[in-house]
Amino acid sequence: MRAAFEELSQNDRKRELSDRDWRALVDASLATRDVEIGCDDCLDQVATYAEVKLAGLLVPEALRLVEEQLAMCDECGEEFQALADVLRDLE
């Protein structure tokens, strides 16, 4: 177990960030806001957001943070898309 950990640590030290990786990190840090929600909070509200969007209504201010999280997080965006697809199929 210890040998596997040491090998992993050595591999991590060898890996360097590319210019693209650095740009992505900088862009992500610049995109942060004073008020954000995380994945758990977003997913708690994504059903309400999906219903509003599918109804063609304007997104209320209370759901703006959900909208921003969906735009920034691929996993949350995928969850929203899957839910929206199911809701469309139910119509």
Image (spheres, helix red, strand yellow):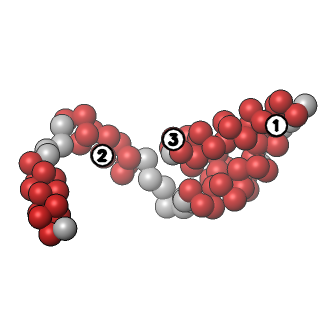
| Element at label 2 | helix
Q: Residue at x 67, y 42 (%)?
A: 80
Residue 71, located in which quarter of the rendered image?
A: top right
Residue 86 in the image: x percent, y percent? 78, 36
Tags 3 and 2 touching, CB below 8 Å? no
Other residues around mark 1 within 10 Å, as few (<14) / some (14–19) / many (≥20): some
Q: Residue at x 90, y 31 (%)?
A: 91
Q: Can you say whether 1 is above or below 24 in the image?
A: below
Q: Residue at x 60, y 61 (%)?
A: 40
Other residues around mark 3 within 10 Å, as few (<14) / some (14–19) / many (≥20): few
Q: Can you say whether 43 is above or below 82 in the image?
A: below
Residue 45, located in which quarter of the rendered image?
A: bottom right
Q: Which mark is residue 74?
A: 3
Tags 3 and 1 touching, CB below 8 Å? no
Q: Which mark is residue 87?
A: 1
Residue nearest the viewer, comparing 55 with 16 = 16
Quadrant placement of the N terminus = bottom left
For marks 3 and 2, give the CA distance: 18 Å
Q: Which mark is residue 64?
A: none
Residue 66 in the image: x percent, y percent? 64, 51
**First along the sequence among labels 2 and 1:** 2
Q: Give the amino acid at mark 3.
A: Asp
Q: Can you say whether 79 is above or below 6 in the image?
A: above
